[in-house]
Image (cartoon, rainbow, N blue to C red):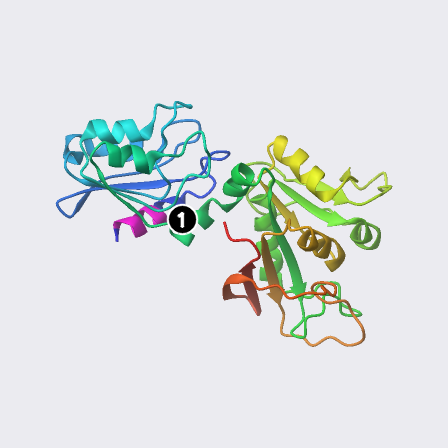
Amino acid sequence: MSLARALELAADAAGSAYPKPTVGAVVVRDGEIVGEGVTEAGGRHAEVVALDRAGPRARGGALYVTLEPCTHHGTTPPCSERILAEGLARVVVGSRDPNPLAAGGVERLRAGGVEVELVDSFEARSQNEAWRAWISRRRPFVTYKVAASLDGRVAIPGRRFISGERSRRLVHELRAASDAVAVGMGTVRADAPRLDAREVATPRGQPRRLAFGRGPLPPSSGLELRSGPLQDELEALAAEGVQSLLLEGGPTLAGAFLAAGLLDKILVFVAPLLATGEAPGILPRLGSEWTLSHLSARRVGEDVLLEAYVQPP
């Protein structure tokens, strides 16, 4: 239950430590929570916050943390050394740290006589999925967002929108939580999209707005043109600090990302509509079968949002 509480703390503070991962930590002694914490932006790690609040009550207790305690001197001293100094008896770790410079906390704690349980929770990994891809894959975590009718069509003649108002608002929230939003040149020419986050909070500012393709861009588009190979462009964006990329628009661009092994997650807003004619589908013909994982579904207004992973975090 205490790891669940640590995950809850991290979820409630999602994005607050950006560009660092958001981590939750809980210190328990004799069945009672004596300290809680989340990673501070530019400051203390979650473990240190929780231990500071627990004080001497932490000795002999247990620490539950969503990400492996670090072993390196970064903006703060190593959390693993602080845990050993405080005399904790047990540590439960929700997920490994993919950063080779910081990883190894599990082994360091065990070597110091601490009982360590590594849970390797999907929920813990997914809370920082963009950061994990940025660190381990050296590119942004790529999510394809699309609205479709019940029969899988992404365009209906005579309708500007397929999804409902609440789904469209959620899309603006997704944009606000992304470092960059992108479409292909076909969508640029057909829709002249703005791709900004509107009428929602944008604590990190507006996302970068990109167009993948040969161009040219209309002078008034306000988009950045990315014309190189997808892998090269993603590596360049990652080097510029882009951890998350939201793909919008038509299926052609998403199909290219999928074929190149660069698509991580798919979000499909399914509307209670049936299309007519020969409108395009969610993706072009793939030529092979793709098995997705961690499928989930939830209502968003009158629509249903389907979420699945091509490459889990």
Left or right of residue 174: residue 229 = right
Three-letter amino acid code at the position of disc 1: Ala
Percent coordinates x, y for residue 17 in the rendering: 45, 35
Q: Which residue is mark 1?
A: 124
Q: Secondary structure at mark 1?
A: helix
What main secondary structure does the magenta stretch of the protein show? helix
Residue 110 versus residue 304: which sits nearer the camera? 110
Percent coordinates x, y for residue 86 in the rendering: 20, 29
Q: Above or below — where is 181 with respect to 163?
A: above
Q: Is residue 62 in sight in this rendering? A: yes
Q: Above or below — where is 286 with respect to 188?
A: below
- Check if residue 4 falls in the magenta segment: yes
Left or right of residue 261: residue 11 = left
Q: Above or below — where is 189 with respect to 55?
A: below
- Residue at x-position 49% and y-position 64%: 296
Percent coordinates x, y for residue 229 in the rendering: 75, 42
Circle 1: is it few (<14), some (14-19), or many (20+) Cα within 10 Å? many
Residue 57 versus residue 263: which sits nearer the camera? 263
Residue 291 versus residue 123: which sits nearer the camera? 291
Left or right of residue 145: residue 7 = left
Q: Look at the image and give the residue range highlighted in magenta.
A: 2-8
* Quarter location, residue 81: top left
Left or right of residue 74: residue 84 = left
* Quarter location, residue 23: top left
Percent coordinates x, y for residue 162 in the rendering: 69, 66
- Check if residue 10 falls in the magenta segment: no
